[in-house]
Image (cartoon, grey):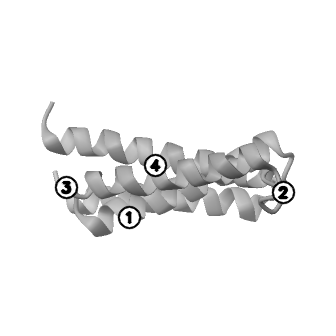
Amino acid sequence: MGPQTFSWLLLAASIAAEVAGTIALRHADGFTRLTPSLAVGVCYAAAIWLMSIAVRHLEIGLAYAVWAGSGTALTAAFGILWFDESTTLPRIAGVAMIAIGVVVLNLETHPS
């Protein structure tokens, strides 16, 4: 496995850690509950650490766009699925546009 492929896997792990931290944030109750609060800190620290390693072999702009866009879309999807948050058409369209934007950024960086 090449360094760029490994970096994409690290970026995916970073996204997963960021989303997990954000879900834990929902349960931390304003950082008044110890276990979810610790999970938030550990997950966010892991997300940043993994991202810092991933950008050694990825363009920072693309990596951050994928990280932020994917994290936002996944967090919104989990909110809809797990926390019964509203599923209005504008919200669904917004998540779809984020996903499309991430794909377009990736295509632009790696023309075929």
- N-terminal of the two: label 3 or label 4? 4
Position of 16 with respect to 95 (left or right) is: left
Is residue 74 at all visible to an observer of this figure?
no
- Characterize the local packing of mark 3: few (<14), some (14-19) or many (20 or more) Cα atoms within 10 angstroms: few
As helix, strand or loop, the secondary structure at mark 3 comes to: loop
Closest to the observer, 103 or 2? 2
- Characterize the local packing of mark 4: few (<14), some (14-19) or many (20 or more) Cα atoms within 10 angstroms: some
Quadrant housing the N terminus: top left
Q: Amino acid at mark 4?
A: Ala
Of badges 2 and 3, nearer the viewer stands 2
Query: Residue farthest to the front?
Result: 34
Residue to which mark 4 is pinned: 46
In the rendered image, residue 51, in percent from the top left (x then y), is placed at: 36, 55
Closest to the observer, 29 or 76? 29
* Rendering quarter of residue 2: top left
Of badges 1 and 2, nearer the viewer stands 2
Q: CA distance from mark 4 to mark 2?
A: 21 Å
In the rendered image, residue 69, in percent from the top left (x then y), is placed at: 50, 60
Of badges 1 and 4, nearer the viewer stands 4
Q: CA distance from mark 1 to mark 2?
A: 28 Å
Q: CA distance from mark 3 to mark 4?
A: 28 Å
- N-terminal of the two: label 3 or label 1? 1
- N-terminal of the two: label 2 or label 3? 2
Of badges 3 and 4, nearer the viewer stands 4
